[in-house]
Amino acid sequence: MQILYNIVVVLLIIMLLPYFLVRLIKEKGFGERMKQSFGFLPKHALDKVAKKDCIWVHAASVGEIVATSPLIKEFRREFPHIPILISVVTCSGYTMANRIIKDADSIIYFPLDLPFLAANTVKKIRPRIFLPVETELWPNLLKAARRYNVAVMMVNGRISDKSVKRYQYMFSLLTDMIGTVNKFAMQSEIDASYIMRLGADPKMVAVTGNTKFDQTYTDVSDKEKMQLISEMGLDTAEGIIIAGSTHKGEEKYILDAFKQVRQIFPKIKMIIAPRKISRKEDVKMICTQSGFSVAFRTDLKEKCSYDHDIVILDTIGELGKIYSTGDVIYVGGSLIPHGGHNILEPAAHGKAIIVGKNMFNFKDTYMLFTKNNACITVENSAGLGNEIVNLFRHPQIRHDMEAASLKIINENKGASRRSALILREVLESLGENPKTLSVPSTEAVENFQTYLFELVHGRRKKNLTGHVIISILDVFSFIYEKLVNLKLWLYKRNLLQQEKIDCYVISIGNITVGGTGKTPTSQRLAREISSMGYKVAILNRGYRAKWKGDVGVVSDGKELLMTAAQAGDEAYLLAKNLPDVPVLIGPDRSLTGQYAIEHFGVEIAILDDGYQHWQLKRDLDILLVDSINVFGNGHVLPRGTLRESLAHLDRADICLLTKVDQAAPHSCEYIRETLAKNNDHALVVESIHNPKGFVEIGDWSTNIGCSGKKINEMAGCKIVAVSAIGNPASLEQTLQSIGTVIVESIRFPDHHDYTTSEIAAVMEQAQKRGAEALVITDKDAVKFPKEIINKENRIPIYIISIAIKFQKGADEFQTYLQEHLPPKNK
């Protein structure tokens, strides 16, 4: 049965490839989802949890993430020292998880349930326990859990009628999956009976209640509620109806009911939240055809208006808070035979709730609210209209329903706490002490990504498995390259539109994965152009920033407004090192650029890491090429480290060769020859990373302007080099060139977040080796634990200060800028 399942899954993935390709082109974030789904998980995410006996919680999409949020709070409270990993399936779930769950250590996309992917992911992470939320049972993942002795506990378990019938046809596969689970923590007695019908041992089944009763991320104050209403231009409405999580074919019923309501209450307005945001234009068309004026929530954020009847909610994860603004709530998926959606989010705000007759996916909750007169059921659009009219005509009926909803919520809280206590029992029954499960270590542990890196770069001998992997990677590289070429072609043919902002745009980027010196080059260029009298801002994507939104201001050119964790280390460093230059983060740099123009009067915008950011039209493309690593292994991702093929070098106006002083003989000539074959117009400039001095981390943290030690003062000093950067060999070579004695080099994965225990172990190792100091980069410094920085009588920790110094072609570069930048009187 397992073999048959695997064949079906593989065939299904092949059939869906065209659909995936379309989404890859059209949908932001889908590329990252696919990359991780095929097992290429980011090192920074893995490093926090891999092989540290983490708690792995899997929630498929937005609904499960809502249920997971209070669980994670309780797990963190119960197990403060154990890393917590969350995996999701959908892009909306990933966005929602990053937005509302703050206590998780890492958030990743769940691997496709293929045998080798599931096994490799479990082997790579080695969690102590895997917790699927609701009914996320995946045969290959559970098989891998059995293989690697990973415990499994279902949390907030829910089984619908359809699922019971569907699972029964899985025969031996179902027996294996059910037999893998150590504990079933189910939402209700009905769900418990269903899982036992599927074969679960009654001794392993517990009823905890629904964790969605515990969620608090949607809590809204009166002030926030009024602000939301104002932002949506609904201040003048005499009542607000919300239709949440609507599906195709359902809006027609809702709009017919709304017409009925408006005949009696013409000043009542409506908010429609389609389940899939991709349907927003279709929903708008249906509303317009029904005679209603419409505005999108995202447009109203930019410019508020009041001349609309309906607001279409086209944002991810906001519905839970928006429910607070409604007077009457209709929960979608219930007038059509979809099975309904969870009514607990509007109930948490104490709202009068209406649903259709098709609530079979949420029988237990639906019965609870219906029995307590907290929910009204309607058969059709006429019934929906009549009930809404009745609730507005008789406010006391509405208020009684609101009170009943809040009473149910308050009486049913505690499922998350009960789940956490059951989890502790499970872990203790396995013979583990949950308080001592995680043992940090500074030893490098080989994982599958390391193996892949060495394999594709020819550093590991190929056996049969290696040849198979390379062949598979070649196929995916071919597909990836064609997709990149197609996307670029669509932009060149204006089939995909580039945004234009009213300032001069300079892009700085590279064509390979890994450190080429983008951040210090952006700093140098910003200073250079600022000294010419222009107002400059840097637009960074905010890689690994905890802040989520459209426009984030890291620095306004006067003071830092975000921490390193909020902004991401690269953006924070740019802001810290450029006190007179605004630094902004956000995924859409046309938005951040326009914001910089309107709020800071910016004339020149620098896109940090922007060579592949084709959405924004630029005036100058500067491409960095690492003279040490050159063009990687010549292959595009995932077979190699090229982000796009070498033919795309032709877009560069200036090619900056970095670290030429550390390059192997003839490397620069080879780079110039390769550039000449693919680009006949670019100015070629050479640069070096010039060490300026060393600053003690304590001084650096509190004083931007301190000078520290001169370069020659560190000559002969015994040091331990510690780094988590793209090219640690370059740092080590620089340190050796200035006369330091490196007694040991400790390399962490790029963008690694250091823990106190890791650095304590590093300092202990440095003491054993007789080191006089640790030396790190400023990129590492922003992630160093404050406990270490503030510790008394510790070994000195110096940050090496690096500046970009232009060499060959420097005068031509200066002239180029003077000739191509816009006139100052523009």
Image (cartoon, rainbow, N blue to C red):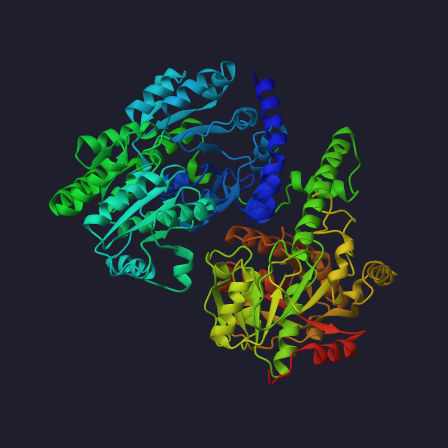
- Residue at x-position 51% and y-position 14%: 172
Quadrant of the image occupied by residue 449: top right
Q: Say above or below: 126 vs 142.
A: below
Q: Position of residue 395 (x, y in %)?
A: 13, 47
- Report if residue 796 is visible in the image: yes
Quadrant of the image occupied by residue 410: top left
- Residue at x-position 60% and y-position 58%: 497
Q: Position of residue 54 (x, y in %)?
A: 49, 39
Q: Position of residue 518 (x, y in %)?
A: 66, 64
- Residue at x-position 62% and y-position 58%: 613
- Outermost residue to the bottom: 825
- Report if residue 410 is visible in the image: no
Residue toward you, 113 or 82:
113
Residue toward you, 378 or 509:
378
Q: How many marks?
A: 0
Q: Quadrant of the C terminus?
A: bottom right
The answer to whether 551 appears left or right of 741 in the picture is left
Quadrant of the image occupied by residue 739: bottom right
Q: Position of residue 230 (x, y in %)?
A: 30, 61
The answer to whether 739 appears left or right of 417 in the picture is right
Q: Say above or below: 700 vs 637.
A: below
